[in-house]
Amino acid sequence: MSDVERHGGRGSGKSLGGIGDGLEARFVDPVEGERETCWRDVARGVALEDCGPVRPFPVRPGRRMAPGWWWSATDGRLVHYASGVMRTQVMLLDRDPSVVALACRPVELTWRGRDGAWVRHAPHLMARLSDGGGLLADCSGREEISRRLASRAAVMEAAALAVGWQYRVLRPPDPVLAANLGWLAGYRHPRYRGAELSGRVIEAFRRPRPLIEGVRELGDPLEVLPVVFHALWTGVLSAPLDKPLHERVVVTVGRAGRGLS
């Protein structure tokens, strides 16, 4: 199961027949600038992961909004995010092996609501998946989503299904997991891969053992620990991340990841 499935959540589960034909999509083409056309055509013919945010990320005095940039280990590009909640979900997607590219708010969908008024919604995140499909996602700072988001999520899910994509409302991850991944993310850059040391790290943890034992066997902890943390980020090594990381945490070889390719 991918991190998308593990930490996300589905929308309302409703399918609105034909919704894909009635949606317009606005995006910012990196060459031609802002464009608006049929959602089906955009989903099938536009690399949204290469498009900039369709809406700005303003700093609002008095509100806990912290726009910033995340360097993506997935594709080596900076991803703009609007808040700490969005940053956490970008981090989780950046570690997901099914994700090959990320973008924040690269598309805005428009449709008529039940009262006849136009509704505009720009999902917080878009991810390109390894199978060529896409994921649209909204980030919720709480486990329970608002009624407003729930109603829009129903349309987003139907719109995604209409073009063979996925839609998720991403709820807050477990705080311990988020803290552990936040620490490991500091070592996500390939400069921590370790070159020749990386192979020795894998061999040292071929059988499960406490972190510090394997590290001390390999040499200077100041040199070895960054390589181990990088391997834990990529999934080359694994440890129980639902519990606080410490020197006696049991580490072993995990799934094959990007980090040592």
Image: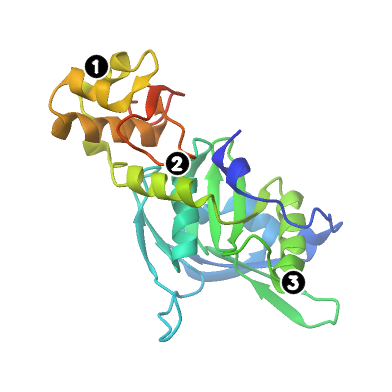
Query: Which of the two labelled residues, at mark 2 and mark 1, occupies the earlier sequence position?
Result: 2
Q: Is residue 155 left or right of residue 207?
A: right
Q: Residues within 10 Å of mark 1 (few under 14, many from 20)?
A: some
Is the residue 34 above or below the residue 197 in the image? Answer: below
Q: Which of 141 and 160 is in front in this view?
A: 141
Q: How many marks?
A: 3
Is disc 2 in contact with disc 1, using a CB cutoff of under 8 Å? no
Residue 165 seen in the current view? yes
| Residue under pointer 1 | 200
Q: Do the residues labelled 3 and 1 touch (CB within 8 Å)?
A: no
Point 26% across, 17% down: residue:
199
Q: Is residue 205 left or right of residue 31?
A: left
When the figure is inspected, residue 60 is found, relative to residue 105, above or below; the finding is: below
Element at label 1: helix
Q: Which residue is drawn at 78% across and 66% down?
A: 22
Name the residue type under label 1. Answer: Arg
Q: Mark 3 points at which residue?
A: 147
Kind of residue sitting beneath label 2: Arg
Percent x, y of residue 254: 44, 23
The spot of residue 109 in percent (x, y) is: 66, 68
Q: Tell me the SS state at disc 2.
A: helix
Determine the CA span between mark 3 and mark 2. 30 Å
Q: Which of the two labelled residues, at mark 3 and mark 2, occupies the earlier sequence position?
A: 2
> Residues at badges 3 and 2 in contact (C-beta under 8 Å)?
no
- Residue 95 got which mark? 2
Quadrant (top left, top right, bottom left, bottom right) of the C terminus: top left
